[in-house]
Image (cartoon, grey):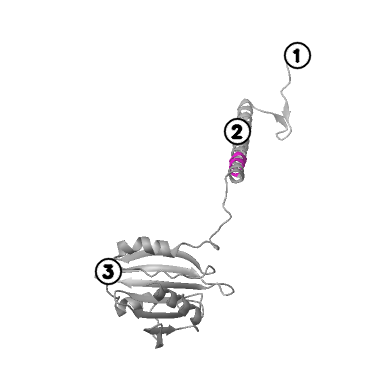
Amino acid sequence: MASKKPKIVAELGRPETPDETAARKAENSRLHRQRQTVNNLVYSLLASLGVVLILVLIVPRGVGDFEDRSVDVVSLAHDASPTAGIELVAPAMPSDWLAKQATIRSSKADKITQWYVGYTTPKPTEQFAAVVQAFTPEAGPANETWIAQFLESKSATGTEEFAGHTWTVYDHRDDDPDHTNVLFAMSTNLENSTLVVYGTDEPIVIRELAQAALDSL
């Protein structure tokens, strides 16, 4: 029987040598393994994305209630007053005032404790407003240094008599509201604390909050 003639490789114009055949087969194997690896990675990625999609679809999700949520300031103030050691203000604002946070904050650096209540004011303005009651460990008013730092070093623009108290006024409504929350502020000293009311809404709105804070004591 005649021996089989070696196959001529078109690229070479002659039969492959044994070494060239071995090299070609090795390269084909390498490329095959590489394609398999890439395919496996693609399949794994698709499987992972599928799992994530399933989890997104089956896990219950809230609709986001922050805009409409309001904490119970009166209850929180009642609960926190024994720890604070003084009666904390608890403004009874109308329902369209949304209290977003009511909390005790303390600073070891200046030894001042703050009772902070932050609001979103009613429509149509829906601005920021807050009342802060600050006091020392001895149940006394905060000092001028603390007030200046708290109000972002805003300068006082005058004083006024309001609700039976003399208030220092900080009227900076010409400032950029994107860079400060202290467009209008008022501060006064009570017997055992300092009351600061401030925000980005109009003075009449800030005064309404100040009046309610005093009325709660």
Residue 56 location in percent, x, y?
59, 46
Distance, label 3 to label 1, CA atoms, is 106 Å
Residue ID for mark 2: 33
For residue 5, side relative to residue 197 (left or right):
right
Residue ID for mark 3: 111
**Dot 1 crowding, Cα within 10 Å, few <14, some 14–19, many 20+:** few
Residues in magenta? 46-52
Q: Quadrant of residue 196?
A: bottom left
Between disc 1 and disc 2, the foreground one is 2
User: Which residue is drawn at the image coordinates 58% and 72% (left, top)?
Assistant: 123
Residue 48 location in percent, x, y?
58, 41
Q: Farthest residue in the top direction?
A: 1
Callouts 3 and 2 close, C-beta under 8 Å: no
Residue ID for mark 1: 2
User: Which residue is drawn at the image coordinates 55% and 62% (left, top)?
Assistant: 68
**Dot 3 crowding, Cα within 10 Å, few <14, some 14–19, many 20+:** few
Relative height, residue 112 to residue 17 (above, below): below
Q: Nearer the viewer, residue 185 or 12?
A: 185
Between disc 3 and disc 1, the foreground one is 3
Residue type (three-letter) at the residue carrying disc 1 = Ala
